Image: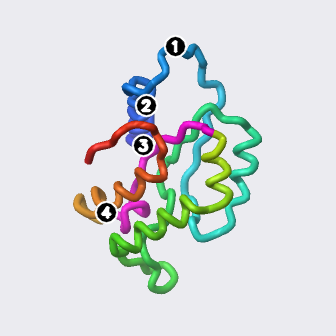
Amino acid sequence: MVFKLVVVVVIILQHVLSKNADFSSNKTLTTIAFGSCNKHDREQPLWKSIIQQNPDIWIWLGDVVYADTRIVPFIWMASTLDSMKEKFDLQRQRIEYKAFLDTGVPVIGVWDDHDYGLDGGGKKVRLESAKGFIHLIPMGQEIKL
């Protein structure tokens, strides 16, 4: 958990200090919204409440989608990269999430085990799945892997 917090702080700093940051703005972040363990294939009524809170920034804390594939209850296998991309695309196309993105709230975050196909799925799988994850995070800056 401490590692995730450090990563989130680094990402926030990267966002703030990026070449696209608006340094003429003196806006202080007063409302920071965050979440994890999102079910891309289920209704997502919380986005409406999150929009009503008018956050200054949204932080994904992992498990944006469950990119691994359930065989039977409690038994999962790694998904293909095409399957992972499809799951990220499904999340991006959710009406509720699109409504949130339309508010213009900056979105940052980290991805972890389920986002990259399987807990401990390996470096290659993580890097490939990051390409799908990045499209969920409209940070307004180029990200190189």
Q: Which residue is mark 4?
A: 120
For the record, the magenta segment spans 104-119
Residue 138 included in the magenta stretch of the image:
no
Q: Earlier in the sequence, mark 3 or mark 1?
A: 3
Residue 116 included in the magenta stretch of the image:
yes
What whole-number distance in Å separates the C-alpha atoms at marks 1 and 4?
A: 42 Å
Q: Which residue is mark 2?
A: 15
As displayed, is residue 136 above or below residue 69?
above
Q: Earlier in the sequence, mark 1 or mark 4?
A: 1
Secondary-structure class at tag 3: helix
Q: Position of residue 53 (x, y in %)?
A: 74, 38
Q: Which residue is mark 3?
A: 4
Q: Nearer the viewer, residue 8 or 99?
A: 99
What whole-number distance in Å separates the C-alpha atoms at marks 2 and 1?
A: 15 Å
Which amino acid lies under the numbered mark 3 shown in the image of this protein? Lys
Q: Earlier in the sequence, mark 4 or mark 2?
A: 2
Q: Position of residue 133 (x, y in %)?
A: 42, 55
Q: Nearer the viewer, residue 66 or 143?
A: 143
Secondary-structure class at tag 1: loop
Mark 2 nearby-residue class (10 Å; few <14, some 14–19, many ≥20): some
Residue 62 left/right relative to 97:
left
What whole-number distance in Å separates the C-alpha atoms at marks 4 and 2?
A: 27 Å
Q: Position of residue 13 (x, y in %)?
A: 42, 27
Mark 1 nearby-residue class (10 Å; few <14, some 14–19, many ≥20): few
Q: Earlier in the sequence, mark 2 or mark 3?
A: 3
